[in-house]
Image (cartoon, rainbow, N blue to C red):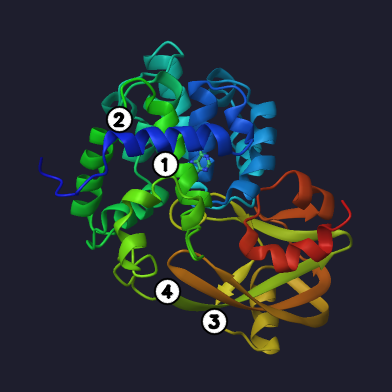
Amino acid sequence: MSHQYTLPPKEAVAELLTWYQANKRDLPWRHEITPYRVWISEIMLQQTRVEAVKPYFHRFLEAFPDVYALAEAEETHLLKLWEGLGYYSRARNLQKAAIRIVTEYGGRFPSDPKELQKLPGIGSYTAGAIATIAFGVPAPAVDGNVLRVLSRVTGDERDILHPHTRKAAEEAVLSLCPAESPGEFTQAMIELGATVCGPNTEPLCKECPLCPWCIAAKTGKTDLLPVRSKKAPRRIEHRTVLLLKEHDRYMIRRRPAKGLLAGLYELPNELGTLTQEEAVAFARENGFQPLHIDVLAPAVHIFTHVEWHMTAYLMTGYFEEHQDRIMATAEEMAGKFAIPSAFAAYIKPITKGI
Ligand code: ADE
């Protein structure tokens, strides 16, 4: 075996499965298991907490109950339903994959993880999760939860962010995956890593079914494992955001089709911290004549690789010409256009109560 993990015995896997049966959380995507529901939930759960995902999962399934509905969805509607979840390329990839599943696979998901991985947005983890949970096909589903559990149980000190470690972990997890219950095993590993052996908290080793075999627990190294190399620090970007208001409408604009928050709507904004005079000049360049200006509270939004430190001005006035900018009411900002959470500090006060 090339993975070099010293794995716990079969008996440990049996203990894990028994623990899962007795302790699994009641989560919406576990009520009825279909490939579509597993897929949507796993994509939503990437980088997003379970509690945050729940209402999105319900709304999404109501709007798009199956892969055909998703394939035919209006992009604006799809992005609106995703608003606030972040990483919007996930939503676009869901639709691209849905179209392929309809056109190339007759509406049925493939069950082979290699085939699943050919679809947009489905990586090794998601393919393993769908194959095991929805189809009962043995496969490794290794996410951050599973890497944490595996590194602690085996006392493995390799950097979990290194691709070689992930590859080795996949081999190890596949060799542990029981042929009779692959889906239960995947979910049990994730569940253990999410609840008992969680991130950023003391692990609850007394409750852990793998504790008798756990090297980290035995050697007091749970707080040192998993080993994770330092990521590059986030870049800080100063931006000035403008709320340009005429009567009951605000100017919004569409972001470019490529790059951060591609294709979503936003408040007009400019790189740098503009003074009031500079902000007024910027508004005028956009065809807006301000009559009154208020300075709003600064706000910070943290993305994966960049932080926006925002200065903002509210200007009331009138537009001289309308070109291709969009003038949206508070209702439209709340209900129609997908505006990323980065602007929430300035949008929420306008749309609250709607
Ligand atoms: N995190 C990733 N996948 C999950 C799942 N299926 N249930 C709970 N948490 C998860």
Label 4 – label 2 distance at C-alpha: 34 Å
Q: Quadrant of residue 189?
A: top left
Across and down, in percent, residue 327 comes to 76, 55
Which residue position holds label 1?
189
Q: Quadrant of residue 251?
A: bottom right
The first of marks 3 and 1 along the sequence is: 1
Q: Residues within 10 Å of mark 4 (few under 14, many from 20)?
A: few
Name the kind of residue labelled 3 in the image. Answer: Gly
Label 3 – label 4 distance at C-alpha: 17 Å
Label 4 – label 1 distance at C-alpha: 31 Å
Q: Foreground: 201 or 125?
A: 201
Q: Residues within 10 Å of mark 2 (few under 14, many from 20)?
A: many
Name the kind of residue labelled 1 in the image. Answer: Met
**Residue at 49% over, 43% down:** 191
Q: Are marks 3 and 1 in contact (CB under 8 Å)?
A: no
Secondary element at image label 1: helix
Name the kind of residue labelled 4 in the image. Answer: Arg
Q: Is residue 257 visible?
A: no
Secondary element at image label 3: loop
Which residue position holds label 3?
272
Across and down, in percent, residue 314 comes to 78, 75
Mark 2 and ligand 1: say if the CB distance to the nearest ligand atom is below 8 Å.
no
Q: Foreground: 174 or 277?
A: 174
Which residue position holds label 2?
139
Which residue position holds label 4?
234
